[in-house]
Image (cartoon, rainbow, N blue to C red):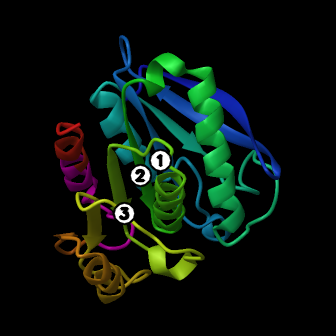
Amino acid sequence: MAVRTEQMVFQGLAGDISCAIDWPDGEPRGWALVLHPHPLQGGARDNKVVTTIARSCVQSGMAAVRPNFRGVGGSAGEFDNAVGETADMLELIRQFREQYPELVAGKWLMGGFSFGTSVAAQVYSTLAQEGRPVPGALVLAGSAVARFRFRDVHVPADTLLLHGEDDDVVPLEEAMVFAREKGLPMVVVPEAGHFFHRKLTIVKQFVLQRLALL
């Protein structure tokens, strides 16, 4: 659980990006950017998978940034099929780095759930292509990268892929196609659906294990 949650606004290409920042107790050792599922299907920064990843980061001593995408909550603009959302997150990262130079000197993680995985993967790919600092860990839960891919995607070999065996939104085989394409191992959670109901402790366990390697 976050010791303190702060509301903050960054500026994207469509206007305000409304964010919640969860702060740990004591001096943060780094930060995380955690991205939510599809805005047109009820996705928002308070989604349980998103908050589970964020709380894992806070427990590990990191500040966790949870933005709302375009058109969600106080964020300006309209859904842009991951294109505008990716551009917005690149702006958020740039502004966050300027505002918190002491934090960005430490480790950082980027995570996403469902639609958020596609934005996260494309943000990572853009940062890497432009020679900008990339996160030390990438976590993709309920991966839907291929559904909203608009550019070549390159992700690190130690990307943590988490998927439910019984996912009825993004079928396991669809996620496996992406995993095979990128040569990535995948953690399949038995009897878990898309939202990992009653399986969130397993999600937290694997995220904490990945964070321990940072």
Amino acid type assigned to the residue bearing label 2 in the image: Gly
Viewer-side label of 3, 2: 3
State the residue at coordinates (82%, 52%).
14
State the residue at coordinates (36%, 46%).
53
Neighbours of disc 1 within 10 Å: few (<14), some (14-19), many (20+): many
What range is drawn magenta here?
Answer: 193-206
- In the foreground, 194 or 26: 26
List the residue tagged with mark 3: 155
Amino acid type assigned to the residue bearing label 3 in the image: Val
The Cα atoms of the two marked residues, 3 and 2, are separated by: 12 Å
List the residue tagged with mark 2: 111
Up-down relation of residue 180 to residue 199 (above or below): below
| Residue 42, position as x, y percentages in the image | 62, 64
Up-down relation of residue 145 to residue 206 (above or below): below
Earlier sequence position, callout 3 versus callout 2: 2
List the residue tagged with mark 1: 34
